[in-house]
Amino acid sequence: MDTAKLELAVQRSREAEVALEAARADVRAEALAALQQDPGPEALAEVARVTGWSAGDLRGAAGAQG
């Protein structure tokens, strides 16, 4: 049985998972940085709009960091 294509697909999948987690970490860091720079309700609404996260989730994340 030749599993070369399967092995390549698995490797690509693992690399994609690593890249996705790194991107998610970047989004979290940038969202928190934006809210630290401007903690007002307008900024909270804008970050929620861009990320798709709820304002409550963002408030909790910002509170956990500060």
Image: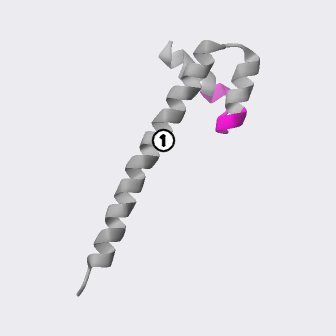
Instruction: Tell me the residue that label 1 is attached to.
Output: 23
Magenta-span inclusion, residue 32? no
Nearest to the observer: residue 13 or residue 62 = 13
At x 76%, y 20%, the residue is: 42
Q: What stretch is highlighted in magenta?
A: 49-57
The local crowd at label 1, few if under 14, some if 14 to 19, many if 20 or more residues have their Cα within 10 Å, is few
Element at label 1:
helix
Residue 4 position in % (x across, y down):
27, 77
At a point 67% along the width and 39% down the height, the residue shown is 52
Which image quadrant is residue 59 in? top right
Q: Which amino acid does label 1 sit on?
A: Ala
Query: Count the marks: how many?
Result: 1
The location of residue 3, given as percent across then percent down, is 26, 79
Magenta part, dominant SS: helix
Describe residue 39's horizontal placement relative to residue 64 as left or right: right
Q: Is residue 21 left or right of residue 38?
A: left
The residue positioned 39% from the left and 61% from the top of the image is: 13
Residue drawn at 55 percent across, 16 percent down: 63
- Res 55 → quadrant: top right
Relative to 9, 34 lies left or right: right
